[in-house]
Image (cartoon, helix red, strand yellow):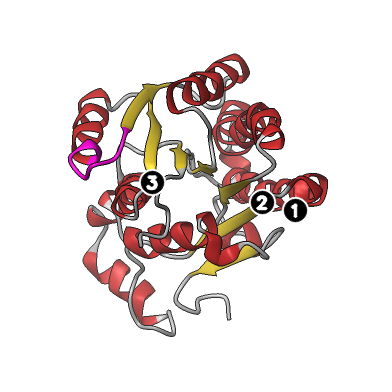
Amino acid sequence: MKLLQGKNALVTGASKGIGRAIAIRYAEQGANVAFTYLSSVEQGEALEAELAAKGVKAKGFRSDASDFAQADKLINDVVTEFGSLDILVNNAGITQDNLLLRMTEEMWDKVINVNLKSCFNTVKAVTKPMMKQKGGSIINMTSVVGLKGNAGQANYAASKAGIIGFTKSVALELGSRGIRSNAIAPGFIETEMTAVLDPKTVQSWRDAIPLKRGGQPQDIADACVFLGSDLSTYITGQVLQVDGGMLT
């Protein structure tokens, strides 16, 4: 029996990296998968075909979750298309790093909107349908940076810390309706973005992690499977660190 058999899931920001890994792992575990992409149209179309080939229903939506109206339409379209929505994974996120001294208002606003406001937009839109079906699992992607901060990432750290407070509040509000809300805090995950960095720098990061390796997108995807499945029906309001012991 596949862990997500027959469940309908939405993953935002899934055209590459962690989001793509989550969408693929969900399909492998039997979930029908809706996902969003923004600029990567070809990658979005390729992912839709790859997911459908695994024998599940799959559909990509070109949508900006940081836009309130677009997010509302997205949730309505997904529920109409799939019949229900059992799992929402808020994965869309960006960085615009700089020291606070040099950070512009635009850099602050953009990161807060894409990372934090998008969670508010999609969760607000999904609340009514999930309440109606008396259940659902909301998974918001935070970061170890949201737990400890990071120099040069004041905007990113604030957005990710905000997601934690938001996730816990949603858990308190919606728990009586059978809706769970949890967050995942990835540590150093090796993706396309880290592949272009200096190998010596990357190795020094690995050496500082107790498990002596960077995480893979699949490590985050597996945590998402757990929190989306019935294996975690008594878990809500939690932050699951997937960081190799980085913040232990």
Which is nearer the eye, 160 or 2? 2
Q: Locate residue 68, reporting x and y percent.
A: 62, 19
Which is nearer the eye, 144 or 53? 53
Q: Is residue 204 above or below residue 221?
A: below
Q: Locate residue 151, reporting x and y percent.
A: 57, 57
* Mark 3 or 1, closer to the camera: 3
| Residue 206 left/right relative to 107 | left
- Residue linked to disc 1: 168
- Residue linked to disc 2: 181
Which is nearer the eye, 196 or 124? 124
User: Label 3 sits on what residue type?
Assistant: Ala
Residue drawn at x 49%, y 27% as measured from the top left: 83
**How many numbered discs?**
3
Residue drawn at x 41%, y 64% as measured from the top left: 188
Residue drawn at x 55%, y 16% as measured from the top left: 73
**Quadrant hosting residue 43:** top left
Do labels 2 and 1 touch, CB within 8 Å? yes
Circle number at residue 31 = 3
Q: Is residue 246 above or below residue 3?
A: below
Q: Locate residue 184, reporting x and y percent.
A: 55, 58
User: Label 2 sits on what residue type?
Assistant: Ser
**Quadrant hosting residue 130:** top right
**Real-space Cα separation, disc 3 to disc 2, in angstroms:** 19 Å
Q: Locate residue 55, reporting x and y percent.
A: 23, 42
Q: Where are the magenta residues, as a range? A: 51-57
| Residue 70 left/right relative to 158 | left
Of callouts 3 and 2, the N-terminal one: 3
Of callouts 3 and 1, the N-terminal one: 3
In the structure shown, which secondary structural element does the residue marked by tag 2 occupy?
A: strand
Do labels 3 and 2 touch, CB within 8 Å? no
| Residue 194 left/right relative to 127 | left
